[in-house]
Image (cartoon, rainbow, N blue to C red):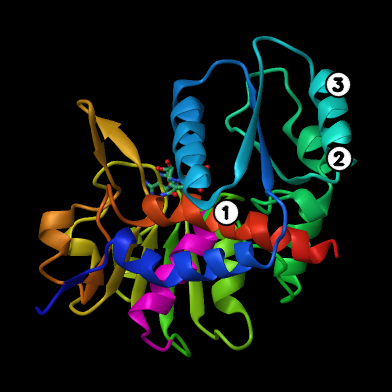
Amino acid sequence: MNTTVVTGDQVLTQLIPRITQCMEGLNFTPKLATLMVGDNPSIRSYFRSIKKVAQKYGIEVIELTWDVTDTETVQHTIEQLNSDIDIGGILIGEPLPKGIDRTALVETISPTKDVDCMHPYNLGLLMAGRPRVLPSTVGSVWEILQFIGVPLTGKRAVIIGRSLVVGKPLAMLLLQKGVDATVTVCHSKTEQLTDITREADILIVAAGKPHLIGKEHVKRGTIVIDVGINVVAGKLVGDVKFDEVCQLASYITPVPGGVGKVTTHYLMYNLVKSYEHRR
Ligand code: NAD
């Protein structure tokens, strides 16, 4: 099989100029507020990479952290950030510690500052076919599909994972009029997963299960996008057995260096675009 490995760096050659162009239209420094409740090493590491990428664009990151706190304290800060005209985006690090009410926090964020499409209003717009912002991981997968450039109309897209941050919103996007894929969403209770995935023209895996997908799940010529990020024996691995699936896929993304690489940049894209929604 003639397989093309699509790296995040390749995809970024198309996304970075668009972000830079949006930045040029702003005559001030865009600001993103990151909120971490409790101390979580994976959130810390994600926020570190966000800060690094932000710096490249000249975007300022305001880091807010709480050791132990209650929902109301964080809500109060979010309200202040909502009314601060300098702040373009608010990002809550997940998972939140037990006892913190995620719904209350997410719904306190002004939808215009919701740069990761967590708020039900923004998810609703996506569902209604009028997305204003995409969750950054979904945006990243979209950029990868655009980069590959294969028409999606009528194609069978199978998504593994039904989370609110990846699987469900991605399904809504691919179902949209104009995109027109035929979408199947699988999850941990799905029976005969292999039979379903073998029908996929596009297989997007976001299960968070290392090496879940092997060659038996994939037909020849499938586009395989691996969203999974797992740490196994100190190494980052995806949900797909890259070496064996690579022999069957027409296009495949690696982990690391695939979806994750684009996600942080897509968040910056959402941030700079968010100022447009408030003009
Ligand atoms: P989640 O745990 O919220 O959801 C996982 C989904 O996978 C669930 O819907 C579950 O039903 C399904 N699932 C689990 N095991 C399965 C199985 N054996 N068969 C079929 N379905 C199964 O996770 P999430 O937040 O959606 O993230 C998914 C993965 O994507 C994780 O590895 C996460 O680290 C990664 N992720 C990557 C990026 C990125 O930018 N690359 C961003 C967000 C999440």
Q: Look at the picture and state if 137 lies above or below 180.
A: above
Dot 3 falls on a residue whose secondary structure is: helix
Q: CA distance from mark 3 to mark 1?
A: 28 Å
What residue span does the magenta drawing correspond to?
A: 137-151
Residue at which label 3 appears: 72
Secondary structure mostly seen in the magenta stretch: helix
The quarter of the picture where the N terminus appears is: bottom left
Say if residue 110 shows up in the picture. Answer: yes
Residue drawn at (84%, 47%) of the image: 110
Q: Residues within 10 Å of mark 1 (few under 14, many from 20)?
A: many
Residue at which label 2 appears: 84
Relative to residue 118, is residue 191 drawn left or right? left
**Mark 2 CB within 8 Å of ligand 1:** no
Give whichever of 15, 141 is nearer the camera.
Answer: 15
Q: Amino acid at mark 3?
A: Glu
Magenta-colored stretch includes residue 1 = no
The single residue placed furthest to the top in the displayed view is 68
Magenta-colored stretch includes residue 148 = yes
Q: Amino acid at mark 1?
A: Met
Measured as percent of width and height from the top left, residue 18 is found at 53, 70
Q: Amino acid at mark 2?
A: Asp
Residue drawn at (77%, 67%) of the image: 125
Q: Look at the picture and state if 12 lies above or below 146.
A: above
Residue at which label 1 appears: 268
Relative to residue 212, is residue 30 drawn left or right? right
Q: Quadrant of residue 67?
A: top right
